[in-house]
């Protein structure tokens, strides 16, 4: 099986690479902007016709798309998250129409969720910001294409190598910096009272492998999450426990606008269990311990591929 991986340089893509390479008979090719990739590609500017010709030459059996942007201008987010998947779908129709496309979506596509409820895949998608709106546009392009395609809608991924721009990654970095100050150490964050559904990046990688290897067509959208909402404060508590930090967390800083707008999200993951045989395995405490240990090592610079 020839698998073409886009966005393999990023946080989730790096975890998925190892899983994809372990699939029986798998040959993993990569696409991105760096010269070392098998296919030089920037989905923000790619044209469907030439890309279709390149895909025909590579002849992939499956394409996994982790490429995306989580921050930047509205133009950048639209180019990468909305235009990119649309171009990829059109190019696949031209050059590799039988390849399975596994596209990584986001819980940000859903938006507001009623307190205490769980979001199933048929819930209304009402994103509250540009990021969620552009991710939804990309997912709709995939789900509406005639390809053998599935959108894996990932909720809040955490794990070793979490990017410094994410709350878990930033907290781990701040704990490394402030911990030597002992009880006098203070880390300032925004409000941590919102509820999110956290899932280990390694469990996500396993689901991606199952989606690629599935021997039948899959539903257009599948949620990937733990299925249990926890306060964002649990991330700080878990990292503090792993670090043995005795200082103080100050929640008076500027927080995420999305956290203020969406106070609760929890996923229904029964479809992923039914269709992929997938279940999240890693407890959040173990995830945060491993993140803390990994934060002592240099983290590769994420690349939007």
Image (cartoon, grey):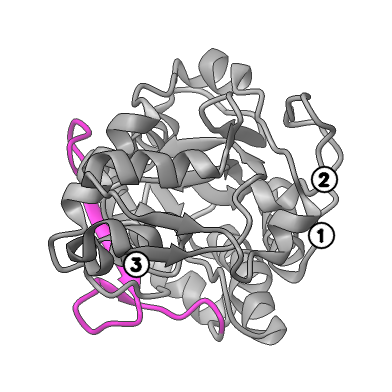
Q: Would you say the residues marked 1 and 3 are in contact, meaning their CB atoms lie under 8 Å apart? A: no
Residue at 53% x, 82% y: name it: 46
What secondary structure is found at the residue carrying circle 2? Answer: loop
Q: Residues within 10 Å of mark 2 (few under 14, many from 20)?
A: some
Residue 188, percent from left and from top: 48, 66
Does dot 3 land on a helix, a strand or a loop? helix
Q: CA distance from mark 3 to mark 2?
A: 43 Å
Indicate whether residue 10 is drawn in magenta. no
Question: Which residue does the image show at 27% across and 82% down from the upper left?
Answer: 34
Q: How many marks?
A: 3
Mark identifier at residue 57: 3
Residue under circle 1?
A: 128
* Residue interval drawn in magenta: 21-44
Residue in front for this viewpoint, 246 or 280:
246
Quickly name the residue at label 2: 112
Mark 1 → mark 2, Cα distance in angstroms: 7 Å
Q: Is residue 185 left or right of residue 237?
A: left
Which quarter of the rendering shows the C terminus?
bottom left
């Amino acid at each position: 099986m020839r698998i073409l991986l886009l966005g393999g340089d990023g946080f989730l893509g790096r975890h998925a690479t190892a899983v994809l390479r372990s699939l029986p008979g798998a040959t993993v090719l990569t696409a991105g902007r760096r010269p070392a990739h098998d296919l030089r590609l920037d989905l923000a500017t790619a044209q469907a016709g030439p890309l279709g010709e390149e895909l025909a030459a590579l002849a992939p059996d499956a394409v996994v798309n982790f490429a995306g942007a989580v921050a930047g201008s509205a133009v950048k987010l639209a180019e990468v998250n909305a235009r990119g998947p649309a171009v990829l779908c059109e190019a696949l129709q031209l050059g590799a129409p039988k390849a399975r496309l596994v596209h990584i979506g986001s819980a940000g596509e859903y938006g507001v969720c009623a307190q205490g409820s769980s979001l199933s895949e048929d819930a209304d998608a009402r994103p509250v910001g540009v990021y969620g709106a552009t991710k939804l546009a990309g997912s709709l392009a995939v789900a509406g294409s005639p390809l053998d395609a599935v959108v894996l809608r990932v909720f809040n991924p955490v794990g070793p190598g979490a990017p410094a721009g994410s709350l878990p990654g930033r907290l781990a970095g701040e704990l490394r910096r402030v911990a030597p100050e002992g009880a006098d150490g203070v880390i300032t964050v925004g409000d941590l009272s919102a509820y999110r559904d956290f899932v280990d990046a390694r469990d996500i990688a396993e689901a991606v492998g199952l989606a690629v290897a599935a021997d039948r067509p899959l539903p257009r959208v599948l949620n990937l999450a733990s299925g249990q909402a926890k306060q964002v404060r649990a991330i700080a508590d878990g990292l503090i426990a792993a670090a043995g930090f005795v200082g103080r967390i100050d929640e008076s800083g500027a927080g995420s606008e999305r956290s203020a707008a969406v106070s609760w999200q929890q996923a229904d993951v029964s479809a992923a269990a039914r269709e992929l045989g997938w279940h999240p395995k890693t407890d959040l405490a173990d995830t945060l311990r491993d993140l803390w240990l990994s934060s002592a090592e240099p983290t590769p610079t994420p690349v939007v591929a």
